[in-house]
């Protein structure tokens, strides 16, 4: 890893599959003359909780953007859930859920409408999507506010809805 990035992980739960969820070897990225990632090696076991920590400018966002197929790496080999990042980007995207630093909810819609929109975008089908929406509203303690416009939600409620939206497609990672 670069000297500014720190990886912190919690071991997998007992009985979980201990294959690699993420494996990166020699990950490199630069923007012009600015070297952002310099040979990062990363191994994250399936079933574990993992955090990538570091100061501003350490390359955390760049690493996540590469791992989620939003930008390409300049070098290195990466596998996500067994899929090659370069050769199988659609397969990688199909197994991941990514929540950004800032909430991506639509304040002009209700919580239910936000989740239903995500279900539609994930092609879940009407009945399955509506069932998943209800399940997530209950799981994230948003059922009572499901039909209220999100612009009236507290910050914590918005964050919970944002996390629920990430889980609509039941991502593996």
Image: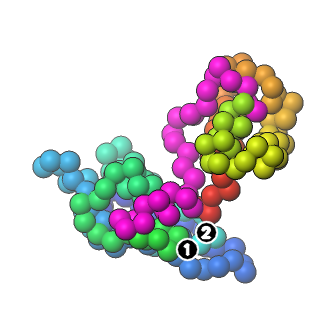
Quarter of the rendering occupied by the C terminus: bottom right
Quickly name the residue at label 1.
45
Picture residue at 25% right of the left edge, 66% below the top? 75
Residue 145: name its quadrant.
top right
In the rendered image of this protein, does residue 28 appear above or below residue 104?
below
Residue 120: name its quadrant.
top right
In the image, 74: left or right of 171?
left
Assess whether mark 2 and mark 1 are in contact (beta carbons under 8 angstroms).
yes
In the rendered image of this protein, does residue 153 appear above or below residue 169?
above
Q: Verify whether residue 106 appears in magenta.
A: yes
Quarter of the rendering occupied by the N terminus: bottom left
Residue 79 location, x and y as percent?
43, 71
In the image, 109: left or right of 98?
right
Magenta residues span 85-112
Q: Nearer the viewer, residue 136 or 28?
A: 136
* Label 2 packing within 10 angstroms: few (<14), some (14-19), many (20+): some
Residue 89: name its quadrant.
bottom left
Residue 31 location, x and y as percent?
20, 48
Quickly name the residue at label 2.
48
Residue 167 seen in render: no
Residue 163 location, x and y as percent?
65, 43
Residue 114 location, x and y as percent?
68, 33
């Amino acid at each position: 890893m670069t000297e500014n990035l720190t990886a912190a992980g919690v071991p997998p739960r007992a009985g979980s599959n201990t294959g690699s969820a993420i494996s990166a070897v020699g990950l490199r990225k630069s923007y012009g003359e600015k070297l952002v990632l310099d040979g990062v090696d990363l191994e994250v076991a399936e079933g574990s909780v993992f955090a990538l920590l570091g100061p501003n400018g350490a390359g955390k966002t760049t690493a996540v953007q590469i791992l989620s197929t939003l930008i390409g790496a300049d070098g290195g080999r990466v596998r996500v859930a067994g899929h090659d990042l370069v050769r199988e980007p659609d397969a990688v995207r199909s197994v991941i859920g990514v929540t950004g630093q800032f909430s991506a909810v639509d304040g002009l819609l209700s919580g239910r409408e936000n989740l239903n929109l995500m279900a539609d975008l994930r092609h879940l089908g009407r009945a399955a999507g509506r069932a998943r929406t209800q399940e997530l509203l209950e799981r994230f303690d948003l059922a009572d506010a499901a039909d209220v416009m999100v612009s009236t939600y507290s910050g914590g409620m918005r964050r919970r809805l944002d996390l629920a939206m990430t889980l609509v497609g039941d991502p593996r990672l």
